[in-house]
Amino acid sequence: MTTSRDPAAPYDIPAHASADDPRVTLEEQLGVFEPIPPYPPRTEREAEFYTLGEGEMFINMGPQHPSTHGVLRVVLKLNGEQVVDLDPVLGYLHRGVEKLCENADFHQAICYMDPLEYVSSLFCEWPAVMAFEKLLDVEVPRRAEYIRVLSTELNRIASHALFMGWMALDLGGLTPILYSFIERDEIVEMLAALTGQRMLFNYFRVGGVNGDLNHEFMSRLGAWMSRATDQIEASLTLLNENEIFVRRMRGLGVLDRETALRMAVSGPNIRASGIPFDLRRAHPYSVFPELEFDIPTRQEGDCLARYLLRMDEIKQSLRIIDQCLHEMPDGPVMAKVPRLLRARPGRAFAAVEGPRGVYGVHAISDGTDQPFRMRIHDPSFVNLQLVPLMMPGNLVADTMAIMASLDPIMGGIDK
Amino acid sequence: MALTAGTPTPGSGGDLPAVADDRREVVEPIIVPNTLWRPVDPAAYDGGRPTQITHLRELEASGLARRDDARWGGALEVIPTKADYVLDLIRMNSLWPLLSGLACCAIEMMSAATSKNDMDRWGMFPFRASPRQADVLIVAGTLTTKMAGPLLRLWEQMPEPKWCVAMGDCTCSGGRYKRSYSTIEGIDRVMPVDVYVPGCPPRPEGLIYGMMKLQQLIKDARGHWPEKPVGPTVPDGI
C-alpha cells in the first residue's frame, strides 16, 4: 500500500479546496463527505444555507443513493422531518463531453452525444446533427426525416415507460418497474434491430440516418404496435387506480405557471403547469408540421399532473408512429455528403423537444473539420434547479417523489 | 455578516456593484471567513476539528479484516476441506450486489435484474441499497475523479468477502471517455477487479455472463484477493 499520509493524523485540507479542485487528491476527497463543505462559504447563498438555525440539522443524501437517479448528491437541511432547504451538489458524473467534442470531428462528436441522456439517447443526437446540417447546408431526405421521427418517438415511449416505473419505485412500489422494463426492453430490442445497439444508438448521421428500415425492425414494430395500446393501458391501471399512489401524488410539489416560466422549464414539466409549450409546434422542425398530434396540457402542476401528462404523451407518440408508418415516403436515407466534413465558419443552434424538455446544441465552427466549440443545453439541468424552490416545507419522504416527478438524468446534468 | 458592503458576491443577485473599467485586471477570489456556520451543539462535528473518517485502514493493517471467519483459522487454514467447498458453493449461489449505478450501464444493470432477464434465477439476488448488506460491487458506468472517493468508500464499507465486477468499457479501460480530463481510465487503477464485462454498455446477457464467471471464480476460491490491499490503493499522480 502506497500511502504518504499517516492514517492516524487528522485530515489537513487546504483552506479553500473543494472536491471539484483537481489538485485535491483522492485521499483528501475521502475526508469531505460531511454535509458541510470543508471550505468556508464562497457565496451568500452558501453562507445562508450552511448556517444552522434552532433545531435544524443537515442530512447528506447521495451520491450513492438508490433514488437520486444517478450520482446526484443532495444536502438537506431538516427541521424535524420537514425539509427547510436543500442544496444539490453536482459534478459526480462530469465527463467533459463538451471538451471532448472540440477534439473530435463532426462524425465523432455525434458519438459523444449519446451517453448524455442515456435513457433517450436519440434525442441528444438529433440537435447535434441538426446543428451540423445547418453549418454544412445539407438537405436531409424526407425518408430520413420520417425515420428520425419514428425512432425518436419510440424512444420517447421507452423513456416515459421507465419514468412510470421509477416514479412508483421512489414512492415505494416495486411492481410497476417490472412492467415498465418489459415495455422498455421490447422497444430497445426493436431499436437495436434498427441501429445495432440497445442503448447508445449512434444512429443519426449528418445528412440522414445510418441505415434504412429493415425487416426485423418492421416485424417487431408491427407485433408490438398491435398490442401496445392494451399493454400500456394495463400497466397504467396499476398506478392510476391505486388510491395510495394518487392521494400521495395529488397536490405534492406544485409548480405554478410563473415559476415555471421564470425558470425556463420545458417539456412535460411546463405543460403540466398549464403552458402548452411544445417545440414540435412552437418552432416546428423536421416533418412535424405534416403530422397530426395533440399537445396534452394539465393545469394542476403537481406530481400527479406531471405523471399523467407523460402517460398522455405516450398515446400521442403512438399516434405519431402510426402516421409515420402510413406516410413513410420512398427514397434515400442519406444525403450526399463528403466523407470529410468541413463546415463553413459560423455558428448554428438547433433544438428538439425531448421527453424531458428542450435539448439544444450550439455549435461553432471555424472552418476546420472539428467543431470549435459545442455548448449543450440539457433540460434536466434546468429542471433540477426547480428542486430547491419546490422542496421547502415538504417531508423527507416526499423529496424523492418530487425529484422523480421532474425526471432528471444525471448524464445530461453533469455532461 | 462578514462581507463588506460593495464586495461583488457571485450569486447574490440584488445590487451588484458597477463593473470595473479595467477588465484585464485579475480579480482576486472572494474569501469569506468561516465565522458564519457552526453547529448548534459545540461538541457536534468533533468540536469543530477537521473530520476524521473511520477508515478500515487500521483494521487492514492488523490483518483482522482479511480473515475469513467462516473458515478454519490458524495453522489449519491451509487445509482445504469439504466444508470449504460447501461454503464456496453457498457463497456463489447467493450473490448480493450493491445497487450503485453510476451512469448509462446502470440502466442495463436494472434491465438485467427485472422481468425479461431475471438475474435472480441464478442466485444473484436483487440489489441491496446498503454496502453493509452487499458482497458484490458492480461498478456500472463512468467513474469520474470526483466520484472515485465515494466509490472507494463504498468498497471499504462492504464486509469481506467481497468481489468487484467492472461493467462497461468506461470502467474496464476508459472507453469513449479515455481522453477526458475528468475520468479515471479503468477502475482497476483505484480498486481490485475480479471480472471485466466489456461493452458500451454490455447487454444484460453480458452482465449475467460476467456474474456467472464470478460465480466460477468464487467456486474455485480465487475470487477474493486476500493478499491485495483493500481500500484506497491510489497510485500517486491520479
Image (cartoon, coloured by chain):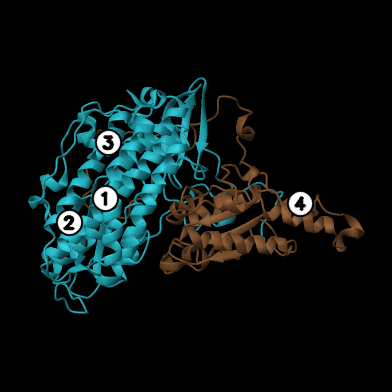
Considering depth in this image, is A19 or B87 the residue closer to the camera? B87
| Circle 3 chain | B
Mark 3 — residue? B13
Residue contact at pointers 3 and 4, CB within 8 angstroms? no
Q: Quadrant of the N terminus of chain A?
A: bottom right
Mark 2 — residue? A325
Q: Three-letter amino acid code at disc 4?
A: Ala
Label drawn at residue B65 = 4
| Circle 1 chain | A
Q: CA distance from mark 2 to mark 1?
A: 11 Å
The x and y percentages for residue B161 are 71, 53
Quarter location, residue A129: bottom left
- State which tag comes first along the sequence, 2 or 1: 1
Above-or-below relation of A359 to B43: below
Label drawn at residue A225 = 1
Q: Nearer the viewer, mark 3 or mark 4?
A: 4
Q: Nearer the viewer, mark 4 or mark 2?
A: 2
Considering depth in this image, is A221 or A370 the residue closer to the camera? A221
Q: CA distance from mark 1 to mark 3?
A: 52 Å
Q: Same chain for the residues at labels 3 and 2, yes or no?
A: no
Q: CA distance from mark 3 to mark 2?
A: 51 Å
Q: For mark 2, give the secondary structure.
A: helix
Q: Nearer the viewer, mark 1 or mark 4?
A: 1
Q: CA distance from mark 4 to mark 2?
A: 62 Å
Residue contact at pointers 2 and 1, CB within 8 angstroms? yes
Q: For mark 1, give the secondary structure.
A: helix
